[in-house]
Every structure is written in C-alpha cells, then in structure tokens.
Amino acid sequence: MSPKAYRWVDEMREIGRTFEGEGGWHGGEEGVFGRVAEVYRFVAEGTVLGEERTEERVRGKTAEDVAEAVVEGLEGREKDMGGS
C-alpha cells in the first residue's frame, strides 16, 4: 500500500461519496472514508513511505514498519510545529 498511498486518497473520498449518495450512509468527505483518505494522504506526504517505489521498496514491507514510519512522520511533524 505505502508506495501507492497517494492513489488511495481520492479513491476513499469517492467511495465515501458513493456510499453517501447511493446508500444514504454518511461516509463522505467528513465521514469515515474522508478520515481514511487523510490517513493515506499522510502516509504519502508525511512519511518516508511516500518516497518508496514499488520495485525498490526498503520501508513499509510489514505492518509493523508502516506503523513505525507513521510514528516517525508524526514525530517529525510535531518537531516542525515546535513541539517536543
């Protein structure tokens, strides 16, 4: 998932709009699928995983490493925002 996380951002939003429009389920931009889209966006833009290429992957080969990379990205974001 991680090398192609950017592709899932719009996909999740579209699924949410479809569920909302066709099924009356509130899962659009502000619902669960919108939030899942933001997770994918962060993986793609806020972690080293977004720099990986499918055929040359180093990071994100296991769920544990994906979680570690997300934590690293969150820690980096916190430092950029002046946190400790």
Image (spheres, grey):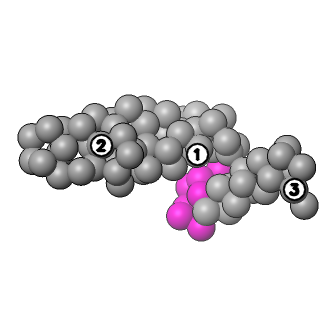
Residue 4 seen: no
Disc number placed over residue 43 in the picture, else none: 1
Distance from disc 2 to disc 3, alpha carbons, whole Å, reads 32 Å
- Circle 2 or circle 1, nearest the eye: 2
Specify few, some or many for label 2: CA neighbours under 10 Å numbering under 14, 14-19, or 20 or more. many
Give the extent of the magenta segment. 57-66
Please tell me which residue lies in front, 64 or 8.
Answer: 8
User: Residue at image x 17%, y 45%?
Assistant: 19
Q: Is residue 60 above or below residue 9?
A: below
Quadrant for the C terminus in the image = bottom right
Cα distance between the residues tagged 2 and 1 = 20 Å
Front residue of this view, candidates 36 and 65 = 36
Q: Which residue is depicted at the point 38% across and 32% down?
A: 10
- Badge 1 or badge 3: first in the primary sequence: 1
In x, y percent, where is residue 1?
46, 46
Q: Is residue 57 left or right of residue 73?
A: left
Type of amino acid under label 1: Val
Nearest to N terminus: mark 2 or mark 3: 2
Q: Which residue corresponds to mark 3?
A: 83
**Label 2 sits on what residue type?**
Gly
Quarter occupied by residue 66? bottom right
The secondary structure type at the circle numbered 3 is loop
Q: Tell me whether circle 1 and circle 3 mark residues in contact (CB < 8 Å).
A: no
Q: Is residue 1 magenta?
A: no
Reading the image, the residue beneath label 2 is 28
Can the viewer see residue 38 in this picture? Answer: yes
The residue at the point 58 percent across, 45 percent down is: 43
Disc on the earlier residue, 2 or 1: 2
Q: Left of 45 or right of it: where is 82?
A: right
Element type where label 2 sits in the image: loop
Is residue 82 found left or right of 74 in the rendered image?
Answer: right
Going by the numbered disc 3, the residue's amino acid type is Gly
